[in-house]
Image: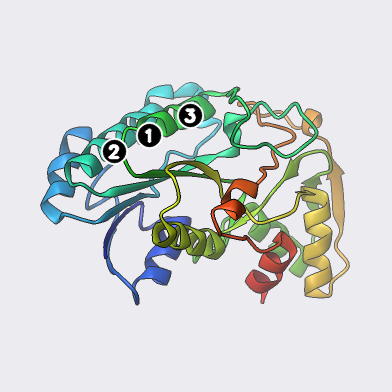
């Protein structure tokens, strides 16, 4: 199987390239090779390399910056995805694209399912939802919504920031009222591979570690795993000024993924493996 991975220098893209390289012909495409914002260059590039699968990990992730520069977000998260989808279709390749919990407004008190109606509350969220719709133009497609990614070589995630503060004996400011389902990039990569092998129906799947947590509870678990009593500053979402609105109850339900035969480990298990 020949797999073309865009955004290969990123957190998730890097994990996918690393974990797939021994079992597939993987082409790691970085921005210097192909800028997803350059839509005219995409189809000739993809068709020339003739992959069996296109996995798009390229994204514009500056949530607050998108409020001031919406075109930058739309070029990558929407128009770039549209061009990649058209290119995958032209190459008769399957298309995998990653979405986000931000497509929901976060006003419920239960984990969101794929059947729930999206209601994006920011430019970034709207651009990502448009990308989901464009990805669906490919006959065989999987849109995998992920959330609060951690892992990979860069170690710049919120989990890494909290763990670094705890290890250093410094206070960590964490939300007590924002509920999430963290996603370990190794587990997301393995789940993606399992879907490609299993060939379930195309569509949107939530691809996160199992269970829900607040950032405060997650920080306490980091301290427990590290054997360090953390100095945590409990913070409420309303007390932190942010340019773009975030969904407060952002947890995703991955039961549909389980019904497709892919069971995600609990977030505590994923966190323990990563910190080790």
- The residue drawn where x is 31% and y is 49% is 94
Q: Nearer the viewer, mark 2 or mark 1?
A: 1
Dot 1 lies on which element?
loop
| Numbered circle sitting on residue 129 | 3
- The residue drawn where x is 77% and y is 64% is 222
The residue tagged 1 is: 136
Specify the color scheme: rainbow
Q: Nearer the viewer, mark 3 or mark 1?
A: 1
Q: Is residue 168 visible?
A: no
Residue 230: give x, y in percent of width and height.
85, 63
Query: Mark 3 vs mark 1: which is more N-terminal?
Result: 3
Judge left or right: residue 258 versus residue 83.
right
Residue 154: give x, y in percent of width and height.
50, 62
Dot 3 lies on which element?
helix
Q: Is residue 236 visible?
A: yes
- The residue drawn where x is 38% and y is 34% is 136
Picture quarter with the C terminus: bottom right
Judge left or right: residue 125 versus residue 176.
left
Q: Are marks 2 and 1 in contact (CB under 8 Å)?
A: yes
Judge left or right: residue 127 versus residue 4.
right
Residue 260: give x, y in percent of width and height.
54, 53
Residue placed most toward the observer, 170 or 112: 112
Dot 2 lies on which element?
helix
Query: Mark 2 vs mark 1: which is more N-terminal?
Result: 2
Q: CA distance from mark 2 to mark 1?
A: 8 Å
Q: CA distance from mark 2 to mark 3?
A: 14 Å
The residue tagged 2 is: 85
Query: Mark 2 vs mark 3: which is more N-terminal?
Result: 2
Q: CA distance from mark 3 to mark 1?
A: 11 Å
């Amino acid at each position: 199987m020949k797999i073309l991975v865009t955004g290969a220098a990123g957190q998730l893209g890097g994990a996918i390239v690393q974990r797939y390289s021994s079992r597939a012909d993987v082409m790691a495409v970085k921005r210097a090779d192909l800028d997803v914002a350059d839509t005219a260059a995409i189809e000739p590039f993809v068709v020339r390399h003739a992959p069996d699968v296109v996995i798009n990990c390229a994204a514009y992730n500056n949530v607050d910056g998108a409020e001031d520069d919406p075109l930058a977000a739309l070029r990558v998260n929407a128009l770039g995805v549209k061009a990649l989808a058209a290119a995958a279709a032209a190459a008769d390749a399957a298309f995998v694209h990653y979405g986000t919990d931000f497509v929901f407004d976060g006003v419920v008190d239960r984990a969101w399912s794929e059947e729930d109606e999206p209601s994006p509350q920011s430019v970034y969220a709207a651009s990502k939802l448009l990308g989901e719709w464009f990805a669906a133009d490919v006959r065989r497609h999987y849109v995998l919504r992920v959330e609060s990614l951690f892992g990979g070589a860069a170690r710049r995630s919120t989990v890494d920031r909290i763990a670094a503060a705890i290890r250093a004996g410094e206070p960590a400011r964490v939300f007590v009222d924002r509920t999430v389902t963290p996603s370990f990039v190794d587990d997301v990569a393995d789940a993606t591979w399992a879907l490609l092998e299993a060939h379930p129906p195309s569509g949107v799947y939530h691809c996160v570690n199992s269970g829900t947590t607040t950032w405060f509870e997650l920080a306490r678990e980091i301290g427990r795993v590290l054997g360090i009593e953390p100095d945590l500053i409990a913070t409420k979402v309303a007390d932190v000024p942010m340019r773009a609105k975030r969904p407060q109850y952002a947890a995703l339900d991955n039961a549909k993924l389980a019904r497709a035969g892919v069971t995600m480990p609990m977030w505590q298990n994923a966190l323990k493996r990563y910190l080790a």
